[in-house]
Amino acid sequence: WKAFRPCYIRAFKDAADYGKDDGETVPGTKNAKQDDYVDKKEFRLFCVYVIVYAAMFDAFAKIDGGGSGRDAGDDKRIEEAEFLKGYKGVTRHGLVALEPIKEKKQAKELFSKVDDNGGGIVLLDEWCTFIKNAEIEAGTQIGKLLAMDEPGGSG
């Protein structure tokens, strides 16, 4: 649970906003709205999102600190030097944004794109947002699933 907690949180937030939120308080709660929960209709999507975000997180964690999973070397962010050292280990994660990286020049360009605020580090939020958008833009099966909770998606 602890190692992949960020995946559960991202999956929950994405799945919870799949259904229509009418702004009304959920019966039996003080002030919770529909988007504060994953309901029965959203649960299957939540399960899929856990798997997708786990793949994104696994790639992130493999680069962060240079090892697989969480350990003392991880600081929950990727610096450019870490990315350039570890990008080859994530090009086969099945994520379209990471597949075309063949050389350091491409890796540097990709790092700049992922680092959307230009801070010189990539946080998990930036990482997942970039990969999600790349999957949606490419029209992959993963992208179609990730787009379901977005405006214009099927939710």
Image (cartoon, rainbow, N blue to C red):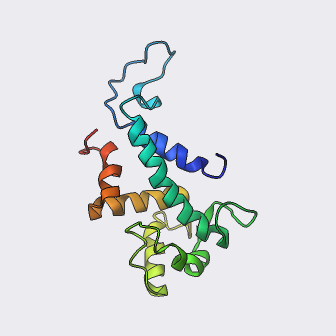
In the figure, is residue 49 to the left or right of 69? left
The answer to whether 148 is drawn above or below residue 39 in the figure is below
Residue 9: image location, x then y, percent: 53, 43
- The image position of residue 37, as x and y in percent, is 46, 29
Q: Is residue 107 above or below residue 59?
A: below
**Closest to the observer: 78 or 138?**
138
Q: Which quadrant of the structure image shows residue 46? A: top left
Q: Is residue 124 left or right of residue 141?
A: right
Please state, as top left, top right, bottom left or bottom right, where the C terminus lies in the image: top left
Write the residue at 43% across / 79% down.
109
Does residue 99 sit above or below 36 in this rendering?
below
**Camera-nearest residue between 115 and 107:** 107
Residue at 40 percent of width and 39 percent of height: 44
Q: What residue occupies the far right of the structure in this picture?
A: 72
Image coordinates for residue 143, horizontal then vertical, percent? 32, 56
Quadrant holding the N terminus: top right
Position in image of residue 52 (x %, y %):
45, 54
Q: Residue at x 54, y 59 (%)?
A: 57
Which residue is at 66% across, 70% downward?
67
In the image: residue 129, left or right of residue 145: right
Residue at the extreme top of the image, as rendered: 28
